Amino acid sequence: MRSILPGRCLIFLLLVFNGVGSLTAQTNTVPFQLKQVDGSPAVAPYKFHPDHLMPEIKWTADWIWLNPDEYPAFQRTKTTWLGSETRTTPYRVFFRKEMNWKPGNSPVYLYCTADVRFRLYINGILSAEGPVNTGGDYDDTKAPDYWYYSIYDISSLLKDGNNTIAVEVFSYALEWSEITSTYGGLLAEIKSGDQTLLRTDASWQAMLDTSLQKKGDWLEWQAGIEPEAWSQPGFNASTWKKAAVQKDLSKTRLFRSNIPELMQAPIQPLTPMPERFLADSSFLLDFERNRVARIQCSFIANEGDTIEIMPFEKKDYVASPSRAIRIIAKKGMNQYRSPNLAAFRYLKVRVASKMPVNFTAFEAIFTSYPLVYRGSFSCSDPFYTRLWSIARYTTQLCMGDMFYDSPMHQEPNACTGDYFIESLNAWYAFGDAWLTRQNLVQTAQMMEKNQYRMFHTSYSLIWVQMLHQYIQYTGDASILTELLPHTHQLMLLFRSYLNKDYLVANAPNYMFMDWIKIDRFNAHHPPAMIGTGYMTAFYYKALRDLAWLHEWGSKKSVATAYLSRASWYNQLADSIRTGIEVRLWDPGRKLYRDGIPGMSKVSPSFWLPADTSIITYSAHFNTLAVLYGITQPERMESLMRYVVTQQDYELQPYFMSYVLAAMSKLNKTDEGLSLVDRWKNGIDTSTYTLKENWQDLSATGYRGDYSHAWGGSPLLFCSVNLLGITSYSPGYTQISIKPYDGNKIEWANGAVPLGDNELVQVNWKKTGASSKWDYQLPPGRTAVIQMPESWRSKKIRINRKKVKYQSSLAYRVARILIEVE
């Protein structure tokens, strides 16, 4: 394995394609090594830091597209919510350019992006796919004036002499998450040292292609229409037109992606695809568990034969297939690789032909963020051990060039409620924070574009919590300079939603609470009388987190200019807490009411139903009142007792993450584990993943999917409470050790990542009345032991020495052995 060199973009596994695609995999000067862990592709430990990427460049290339004089109807792009509804049929644009190259001492880098997406070939070999998702919101109808690009080390793909660079660019979105400027464009530059070897300009050749189109739920490829071997050296492109500079994109602001390239690994079905398909037959391929993959196949067929590939998460799933593929074959060899990702365990392959069809290859190209399985967990209860593993795997399925709510939905970058939970699991399972960092930055850019309003209003406030937790794990003060101005604009926006009682009574909507009904209302988008307390609690938490971030940042000399804001945030939070106490606390019920009917001055809409005269006491708001310290300490246990015993509705996996966090706050680990037992109905053993909701069909009529990582909070709960490791100070400069003191678990062991491949190893066991904990820590870290209250009357030895009970005790050693009896 080659060492990581400064300036090298990390490219893990490139799929070598001859034309549309052969099926050979190769590594390309990569610091990754593929390995199999717990039934999933992963990578061996590596180090990544954006500072090791090539620096951002001053672009000399032009955005290019089809010549508008030749193709006036093929200039615009279309995504789910952006682009002209009257635009012509979905299309791709093919580009080609020859480049002469002599090997030298400097590596060769490709800087590339496109709108909407691209695949780039060097000498007929698929060498790059992108760009990374720029980030948008649900129902986002404002085009960005910025875009993301990636850097690829292509040194090993070039040959001495002439090289063919070919690119296909899609003018349409294949996923909800994709966004567009509404103008098609390709931007590329190849550099070696200070020399520019190639750049996009009007000398490139371009061709319009309509062979691959979205038709309803199907992506249909007419193989006979696409020019054969168009990406190969020696292809005759003399009939192609010259490209034109795309002036509408000339002012686009460009940002380098700061995450590694995705991991890709071929996976074979449990039972091989039959080599020979009889006419009009079908076959079911089983990939053992749910996968996120591109589908790749090659086959010999007759002209007009139809091959249909239908992905399903479950064999008996009643919904339509996810991202189904229809191939209208040409005579002879056909090679196909899907440009988008599908979530599936099963692929139903159906062939319609008058003659047999011979398949030469069929596989799934598993694709995810390049994750190292650094974290681990096991304990005396096999269910919790297995659940932790399933939550880890589901989290991996939801990590690509962005977080996904699920690989089935692939919703936009602004589903922060999902991504907050996934970012926490990504740390404890994989020790990765770079995807979280990029998501935080992209969300800020998206909010600035949209005047800081998000479709799911509560998610914008959860974004602040995500930033706070990112700092706790990484200690990365540099991000504050970029993001604190955005957080302040968000706080000002929510200040405008407050009423005279300091309650968020005038928000445009109160999405999202849960996939349940509260009274007769869908809690996905409840009325103000149900959502006011819930939203106010999130605003309160955001203000407290920001006050802390400004105070901490000032000590790091990155927030000094904004330090005065900390007191303003705290004062406003104090007023909100008082308003909640005065207006929403019900002394008779000893609960918090959700809101007061008629308090909101906002006109009802589809996403904001009109208030009625009911009063509700949701488990959601009462949980947040405990978790965020809004209520008095003496009320907390009784409030949580209400939350876990009320029978009006069943809290779904998403909001259970907040309930489990509240249990952690109250040191109620065994009670929390009893709640984790609900996940016996939350996992699907046939897919080895987490369901979106407990039921396949929720009370609101919503049918969820089977790879939804927002239900992964038991992973965090078990790592935090059974392994007992958290960050005592940002960046784990001090490590908090809190030994488990319950009765449900007899032993546990595992590892908690600290970043840079450093781990805390934990191993403990109870034997009768005595217990032993063994912690191995990286050098140079201080451990702060948080002793349970029950230890006051017990004998305690730390590293073989007797110690008296203390609520906390600090050690700076590489190993800590605790014995209690």
Image (spheres, helix red, strand yellow):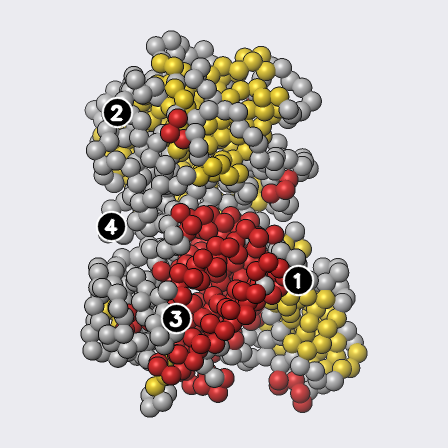
Q: Amino acid at mark 1?
A: Lys
Q: In the rendering, which numbered label is found on residue 555? A: 1
* Front label number (2 vs 4): 2
The residue beneath circle 2 is 73
Q: Are marks 4 and 3 in contact (CB under 8 Å)?
A: no
Q: Are marks 2 and 4 in contact (CB under 8 Å)?
A: no
Mark 2 / mark 1, whichever is N-terminal: 2
Question: Element at badge 1?
Answer: helix
- Location of residue 490 with respect to 67 vertically, above or below: below
Residue under numbered circle 4: 319
Q: Is residue 694 left or right of residue 468?
A: left
The residue shown at (27%, 22%) is: 72
Q: Is residue 215 visible?
A: yes
Number of marks:
4
Camera-nearest residue between 819 and 458: 458
Q: Is residue 417 left or right of residue 112?
A: left
Closest to the camera, between mark 1 and mark 3, is 1
Please state which amino acid type lies under the numbered disc 2: Ala
Sequence-wise first label, 2 or 3: 2
Above or below, 216 relative to 241: below
Looking at this view, is 391 or 169 the one in front? Answer: 169
Residue 760 on image: x %, y %: 66, 62
Task: Determine crowd level at label 4: few under 14, some 14-19, many 20+ residues with C-alpha closer than 10 A.
Answer: few
Separation (CA) of disc 4 from disc 3: 38 Å
Residue 536 found in image quarter: bottom left
Residue assigned mark 3: 536
Residue at x 41%, y 39% (from the top left corner): 145
Q: x%, y% of residue 454?
A: 36, 55
- Measuring from the top left, give residue 637's x and y in whole percent: 46, 84
Among the two numbered marks 4 and 3 on one chain, the one whose residue lies closer to the N terminus: 4
Disc 4 marks a residue whose amino acid type is Ala
Amino acid of disc 3: Thr
